[in-house]
Image: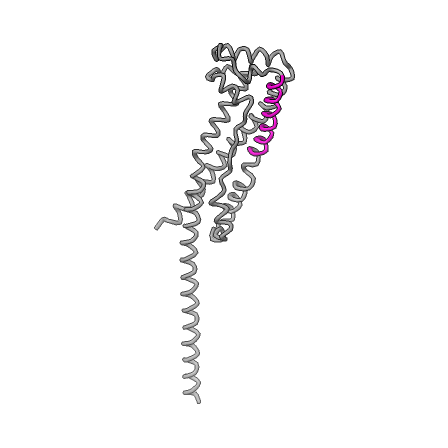
Amino acid sequence: MKKYLIKYSLEFLVIVMGISVSFWLSNYKDTIENAEKEIQVFDDLFNGISSIDLGIENRTEAFKFDLDIIENLLGLSDFEKYNYDNLMVAVTDWRGFGLNQDTYSTLKEEGSLKYIKSKDIKIKLEKFYNSAGGGIISNMEDDKIMQREILKYLNYNYPILVLRNKEYNDESLILNFKSIVNKDLTLKSLIKAKHRFMSNKYDWILRYDKTQKELKGLIKFKLDKLLKP
């Protein structure tokens, strides 16, 4: 009886150990796979967020250029490195900014973001892709509205400014535009309103740029840490 008890006990122990080893190996395999997937997700995120570097830089420069022109037109700065066509674009047009979320949206839809262990990074990603650009977009829409109002007002009251008289050089045309703005309070008021939204839009893209750089640095740090032997 004792012999059978020992025999069955050993068999049971072997079975339990086999199950435990199998379970441990399965968990170990899952851990390795999840770690590899986390690296891939961070790599995709880093490439995705880096792909908008040039777009942010170009839009920031364009926003600032237009803003400088408007401020000079309103007598708020001495910036003069622009021509009449530049002036008309700044006054009667608007510049947009597209928020590229393709990589993040794809990873989110696939459920790949679950492999990111850091809650802090997940929160920062959510804020960057869902709210960081909101200030740019809202002021861009207001800028667009004012652009239409100004163009409508100029077409009705000063069509010659829109058509451009080629008999005069840029300097003369710009001086004439400034003179009209100073005399016409309605036009000046419209341009001041546009200036406010353009200024806000520029401030927001600077914040967006800062947030993007911080997030990119955080992702790079995490990626380097995961890839470290």
Residue 153, position as x, y percentages in the image: 62, 20
Q: Which residues are magenta?
A: 136-156
Q: Quadrant of residue 19?
A: bottom left
Quadrant of the image for the N terminus?
A: bottom left
Examine the residues drawn in magenta and state their main secondary structure. helix
Count of numbered circles on the image? 0
Residue 142, position as x, y percentages in the image: 60, 29
Q: Residue at x 61, y 28 (%)?
A: 145
Q: Say if 83 sits above or below 126 in the image.
A: above
Q: Inspect the magenta stretch and tell me whether residue 142 lies in it.
A: yes
Q: Say if 44 sits above or below 188 in the image.
A: below
Report the front residue among 206 and 106.
106
Q: Please name the colour scheme applied to the rendered image.
A: one colour
Report the front residue among 219 and 176.
176
Q: Inspect the magenta stretch and tell me whether residue 192 lies in it.
A: no
Residue 161, position as x, y percentages in the image: 55, 15
Residue 134, position as x, y percentages in the image: 57, 36
